[in-house]
Amino acid sequence: MPRIHRLLYLSVLVLAGSGGPSLAQRPPGPGAPCQGLANLSARECFDREYKMAQDKLRTFLTQINDALAAPEDRKRLSRAQAAWIRERDLTCDADAELHFGSGSGRDSEFVSCLLTGTNLRLNELHSVYDRNVERTRRQSQ
């Protein structure tokens, strides 16, 4: 199952980046964070947003682990998460290098990609584990 998730994640990144600018440089939707900021301000904004996304992901991973009864399921999730982090980081590094090299927009591009990837991962985990987490919540009440 982690392989399917990885393929889904890569497919989304490929589709999002095909034929146009990178994820961070796409026109943001209405109310998007960090919209129209200069490089340093954008980097700081993306850093804040990324940290919030990481906190949400960590919280949900804790809830998932609490919902998984079998230790081997928790180990599989942990290994999948570690592999996902490596893949996300390598993908974002390649994206930033491709679009900015060592230019001034590289850092913003990298962190924006981390933010996008983290939010995609959180959505992906919700689609797979929400039922397990909700069942555990109901049982503990």
Image (spheres, grey):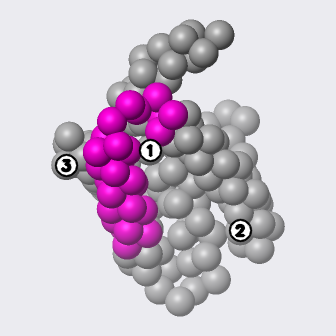
The N terminus is located in which quarter?
top left
The residue type indicated by label 1 comes to Arg
Question: Quadrant location of residue 139?
Answer: top right
| Dominant secondary-structure state across the stretch colored magenta | helix
- Count neighbours of disc 1 (C-alpha within 10 A) and say few if under 14, some if 14 to 19, many if 20 or more: many
User: Mark 1 or mark 3, which has the lower sequence index?
Assistant: 3
Picture coordinates of residue 30 (x, y %)? 67, 34
Cα distance, mark 2 to mark 3? 31 Å
**Mark 3: which secondary structure?**
helix
Judge whether residue 3 can be spotted in this image. Answer: yes
Establish if 22 lies above or below 132: below
- Count neighbours of disc 3 (C-alpha within 10 A) and say few if under 14, some if 14 to 19, many if 20 or more: few
User: Mark 2 or mark 1, which has the lower sequence index?
Assistant: 2
- Count neighbours of disc 2 (C-alpha within 10 A) and say few if under 14, some if 14 to 19, many if 20 or more: many
* Magenta residues (range): 64-91
Residue at 51 percent across and 60 percent down: it is: 113
Residue 121 bears which disc, if any? 1
Judge whether residue 25 can be spotted in this image. Answer: no
Please tell me whether mark 2 or mark 3 is closer to you in this view: 3
Task: Tell me the residue that label 2 is attached to.
Answer: 43
Callout 2 touching callout 3 (CB < 8 Å):
no
**Mark 2: which secondary structure?**
helix
Please tell me whether mark 2 or mark 1 is closer to you in this view: 1
Cα distance, mark 1 to mark 3? 13 Å
The residue type indicated by label 3 comes to Arg
Task: Tell me the residue that label 3 is attached to.
Answer: 3
